[in-house]
Amino acid sequence: MSEIKQGDTVRIHYTGTLLDETVFDSSDGRDPLEFVVGSGQIIPGLDSAMPGLAVGDKKRVEIACVDAYGPINPAMRQDIPREGIPDDIPLEPGTQLQMQTPDGQALPVTVVEANEATVTLDGNHPLAGQDLIFDIEVVSVN
């Protein structure tokens, strides 16, 4: 049985949890996640755990936030004038919106707070600043 190496296409089943064991994502009931090892398609901490594993292997991978979605970046949190947002856009805290950067890229943001004058939007990934745990099972290696 061959071991996974950089450049291999692998398929894994996984369950991602926070340190308190809250599940934030899982492939349970879905097709396995497929990616090329070392290509940057998945978070670095999970990618670097793949080499040396083989089909059927199961592993628990603990990933520090710097190797997952990174630390919280305060510059990604911004207050904008309320009048700059159309009235039909919901602004309840926790609402996910999409903005456009000056170069045309889509940027998902979360409403943190809204009042009559300003809306605070957070462009950090929802899992930024979190250490994560992945329980994985290798399904295939090509």
Image (spheres, grey):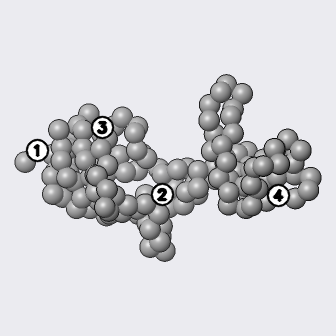
Q: Which mark is residue 64?
A: 2
Task: Say if residue 86 shows up in the picture.
Answer: yes
For the residues labelled 1 and 4, the Cα–Cα distance comes to 54 Å
List the single residue furthest toward the right: 117
Secondary element under disc 1, as helix, strand or loop, is loop
Disc 1 and disc 3 in contact, CB within 8 angstroms: no
Few, some or many residues within 10 Å of mark 4 (<14, 14–19, 20+): some
Name the residue at 75% across, 49% down: 89
Q: Which mark is residue 73?
A: none
The residue carrying mark 4 is 114
Of tags 4 and 3, the one toward the viewer is 4
Q: Position of residue 116 (x, y in %)?
A: 91, 56
Secondary element under disc 3, as helix, strand or loop, is strand
For the residues labelled 2 and 1, the Cα–Cα distance comes to 28 Å
Task: Say if residue 14 shows up in the picture.
Answer: no
Q: Position of residue 115 (x, y in %)?
A: 87, 59
The residue carrying mark 3 is 36
